[in-house]
Image (cartoon, rainbow, N blue to C red):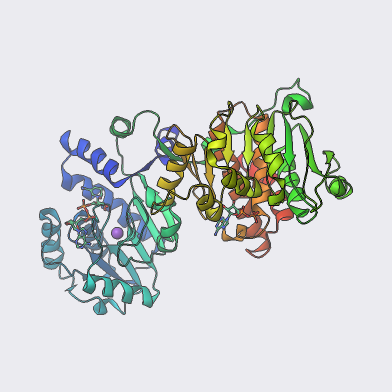
Amino acid sequence: MSHFRESLESIVVSANQMSQIEGRIFEAGMPVAALMEKAAGIVATRIQQLYPFQKVSIGVLVGPGHNGGDALVVARELHLQGYSISIYQPFSKLKELTLQHARYTNSLGIPHHQTIQALQECELIIDGLFGFGLERSLTSDLADAVNLLNQWQKPVISIDIPSGIHTDTGAVLGAAVKATHTLCLGLWKRAIFQDTALEYIGKAERLDFGIPHSDVWAILGQNPLIQQITPTLARSFLPLPRPLVTHKYKQGHLLLICGSSRYAGGAILAGLGARGSGVGMLSIAVPTSLKPLLVSHLPEALIIDCPETETGAIAQLPSLSQYDIIACGPGLTQDAETIIEQVLQSEQPLVLDADGLNILAKLGISKISTRQNPTILTPHLGEFKRLFPSIENLDRISAVSEAARQSGAIVLFKGARTAIAHPDGKIWLIPQSTPALARGGSGDILTGLLGGLLAQSKQPVDKTVAIAAWLHSQAGIKAAKDKTELGVDGITLAQYINLAVSELL
Ligand SMILES: NC(=O)C1=CN([C@@H]2O[C@H](COP(=O)(O)OP(=O)(O)OC[C@H]3O[C@@H](n4cnc5c(N)ncnc54)[C@H](O)[C@@H]3O)[C@@H](O)[C@H]2O)[C@@H](O)CC1
Ligand SMILES: Nc1ncnc2c1ncn2[C@@H]1O[C@H](COP(=O)(O)OP(=O)(O)O)[C@@H](O)[C@H]1O
Ligand SMILES: [K+]
């Protein structure tokens, strides 16, 4: 892919932004019908690549707007190529252009049906009910039709976005088409990155139909607020190549503070994540009784044995001044409150995870507001709710953005699709991952990896946080490919980090 085309690949837009971008194109003179012909023509070509066997019978769902218009153009082209097409068109009132296409497909003899049952024998469904113009919930008859379609469990290709999914929030509006494949038109829409929409989107693909870059930048600005991490961005954010003349302390010194007699494994896994980052020097502060265990798992790390509480948590920390980055939390238990107070006073960038976050929630999130250097919070949903109880009823992308704004921290919101927000409004999205990571210990690996990359990086902190999350997901994907979704324990995951890096280069 050329650099020119690739630069649109990272862009993620809302419905409103997409409609403004299209609006500029139309205002400049591009006929609406010509743009539809272009976009839908590319969809039809892609469907032919995916299903080249013309004997396949295809059902096409047609909505009232331009998504329906796209679907009719696709129906026409596939019909002319010899495919057997049946159309489901439940609306009598159509937008003018869509109506014209419907007249023509009718004249070609393609059957138009008002009930979805007529499509029951079709082997493939193309969904053009609604695109980014969906503004209210699907009503009863239509919702019933969509639910019935989902029960058939046929291959479904959705045009632009699965119909019924809100383009921004990814919420299901009444009912939504469960696609096996989504062909996103022109620019990635927000919903593609929302956990709530994932089961509906299937395999997502962006089809470029030649949107002028100037129109995109005119609406989004040169530094768009929301971007997904692409391999090109990931490559440019990595702390590579290393300078030839360097030494270990110049490649970053990370202090991990983690573990307790109850949760020893969290410290080991965070250490292994840091190992995967290639950090120059790794120190790990653990309760004194854990030292021999940590030394045996991580011979390269400097293990600092800390006095421990009666319950086996870290009671006291060494001086923190010599480290580039501190990452703190995995396996601490809630008894480590005093040390969280101490790390909050530290002058370095600070990553807080797991019990570090639970203790911070108790102390109050405002505790981080006086910190001079960045604080990075890495909550999963449960931790997020404890930290930000006032953020309710928002989709994940809006929620993480609001959390960063309220707290002044960089917030990495873990999930099936992890999202990272900077207090200035910038958001990074992680496009792919694997449920193989839904497993105790995956998050500890991320904490170590993130700390280790931050210690080495010369990039802005939010970019490094994003690349850590991206590598973590990629390592999971690669491990799951080799070992199945059941084979990605923490130690395995850590070993695949390096493979994710080397494949990127
Ligand atoms: N305008 C163009 O020429 C292009 C449009 N494109 C397509 O156009 C789509 C956007 O088209 P539109 O703006 O027409 O919007 P949609 O086709 O997504 O749907 C909007 C229509 O559905 C109605 N509607 C919304 N919610 C409804 C509900 N719950 N129940 C019943 N009716 C409902 C609206 O009143 C409107 O008529 C994109 O997703 C894409 O597929 C792309 O092909 C690019 C080119
Ligand atoms: N369904 C999923 N798909 C992709 N990634 C997931 C999924 N569930 C969890 N993850 C990832 O796995 C990690 C789990 O972290 P966390 O919940 O902190 O676990 P732990 O504390 O047990 O290590 C996060 O990076 C999260 O994004
Ligand atoms: K659709």
Query: What is the quadrant of residue 435 in the picture?
Result: bottom right
Q: Which residue is drawn at 59% across and 50% down?
A: 473
Quadrant including the C terminus: top right
Can residue 261 be seen here? The reply is yes
Along the line of sight, the residue nearer the viewer: 478 or 224: 224
Q: Residue at x 61, y 33 (%)?
A: 238
The outermost residue toward the top is 245
Image location (x, y in percent) of residue 403? 46, 42
- In the rendered view, would you say 121 is above or below 207? below
Q: In this view, does 350 lie to the left or right of 38?
A: right
- In the rendered view, would you say 447 is above or below 108? above
Count of numbered circles in the view: 0
Along the line of sight, the residue nearer the viewer: 434 or 427: 427
Query: What is the quadrant of residue 125 in the picture?
Result: bottom left
Image location (x, y in percent) of residue 262? 77, 57
Q: Is residue 14 left or right of residue 291?
A: left
Q: Residue at x 41, y 33 (%)?
A: 4
Q: Is residue 459 left or right of residue 79?
A: right
Along the line of sight, the residue nearer the viewer: 447 or 335: 335
Along the line of sight, the residue nearer the viewer: 451 or 496: 451
Image location (x, y in percent) of residue 488? 67, 59
Can residue 86 be seen here? The reply is no
- In the rendered view, would you say 107 is above or below 471? below
Image location (x, y in percent) of residue 321? 74, 26
Ligand 1 sits in quadrant: bottom left
Q: Residue at x 86, y 42 (%)?
A: 299
